[in-house]
Image: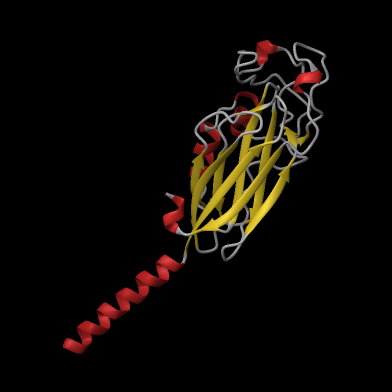
Amino acid sequence: MKFKLLAIIFGLLLAGTAQASDNHHYKVTITNLTKAQVFTPILVLSHRNGVHPFVVGEPASDAFAALAEGGDIMPLEMMMSGNSKVVDINNSGGLLMPGETVTVFVDASGHARRISLASMLIPTNDSFIGLNNVVAPRGHGKKTYWVPAYDAGSEPNDELCVSIPGPVCGGEGGSPGAGGEGYVHISSGIHGIGDLAPETYDWRNPVAKVVVQRVRGEDSD
């Protein structure tokens, strides 16, 4: 009986060790490389393969359009939290100013070795930065991504402050039903056709540097 009890305890210890070794922690560091564009709170996901918050060349979902047009991460967060392939969701919690860097931590486990993220650029109509289903590094390595600006194609690029939120314009966040190009594509930037001066607010890609690194659990606190 004594040996049987010891065997059970040993088995539980092994199971706990295996479960702990199956957990991953990722440090996602984002730097705003633009001169005058601000990043809204950055939504970061860890998930298994097959999760795509957006797809270039296809229409943006309503939840993603809310992020791209108004910086509202809640609809996309709710949609992603209902996906069984998504393991963890976190966000940067505030605006990321030009030249600044922020770090977001997410947990993962098992085969959930993919990372996605998104954030609106302001002041723009519906431009955003995004990583889509990228493979996270193994071991304690890290991967660096130079991220362009995309356009959600869900709102006309009129560059008018009335439809652009944020500290520069202070306009309305979303424009549901306003139309646009109809699909996600590389953003063409600011051209000075409305209220925004291109010499100040335009950019050249990439607009963000993203470093994904696997870290130990105690380093993610």
Nearer to the camera, 123 or 59: 123
Residue 105 spot, x, y in % from top left: 50, 47
Residue 1 in view: no
Q: Is residue 95 above or below residue 11?
A: above
Along the line of sight, the residue nearer the viewer: 111 or 214: 214
Image point (51%, 32%), residue name:
74
Q: Residue at x 64, y 35 (%)?
A: 61
The image quadrant that residue 187 belongs to is top right
Q: Residue at x 26, y 84 (%)?
A: 7
| Outermost residue, front side | 99
* Residue 8 visible in the displayed image: yes
x, y percentage for residue 176? 64, 21
Residue in the image at 30% along x and 74% along y = 12
Question: Which quarter shows the N terminus?
Answer: bottom left
Which quadrant holds residue 17? bottom left
Spot occupied by residue 175 in the image (x, y as percentages of width and height): 65, 19
